Image (tube, helix red, strand yellow):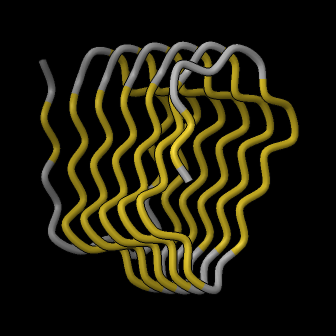
Amino acid sequence: MTTIVPTELDQPDVIELSGGELDVAELSGGELDVAELFGGELDVAELSGGELDVAELSGGELDVAELSGGELDVAELSGGELDVAELSGGELDVAELSGGELDVAELSGGELDVAEIGIINTFDL
């Protein structure tokens, strides 16, 4: 298992995260791109004024503790889990949610877009 634990990121790109774990303590004013997250775990403690793009989340887990003034884009969420504890003044876009789980604890002054919803285990909003 591969574990990457940076404290702050400016302009990182991660092409493929498979079976590993990526922890980001603070993503502020930067951009984090993950082409494919398969069977791994991506944790972001705070996403403030930055952008987090995940092309495909399949069988993995994406946790965002706080999304404030940032943008979180997930092209395809299939069989995975997307947890957002607090979405305040930010934007969360999910193009396709099929057989996965999307949890949003608090949505305050933000925008949540889900283009296509397939079979959803739980949808908390």
- Left/right placement of residue 26 relative to residue 7 reads right
Question: Which residue is at a point 36% across and 14% down the rendered structure image?
Answer: 39
Direction right: furthest residue: 115
State which quarter of the image contains the C terminus: bottom right
Residue 7, above or below 78: below
Dividing the image into 4 quarters, which one contains the N terminus? top left
Q: Quadrant of residue 64?
A: bottom left
101, 1: nearer the viewer: 101
> Where residue 85 sits: x, y (%)?
36, 61
User: Quick one: 15 or 38, which is closer to the camera?
Assistant: 38
Q: Residue at x 32, y 71 (%)?
A: 9
109 sits to left or right of 45 = right
Q: Is residue 76 above or below residue 39?
A: below
Seen in the picture, residue 28 relative to 24 is either above or below; the reply is below
> How many tags in the picture?
0
Horizontal side of 30 relative to 78 (left or right) equals: left
**Quadrant housing residue 99:** top right
Q: Is residue 62 above or below residue 109?
A: above
Q: Quadrant of residue 71?
A: bottom right
Residue plotted at (65% across, 43% down): 74
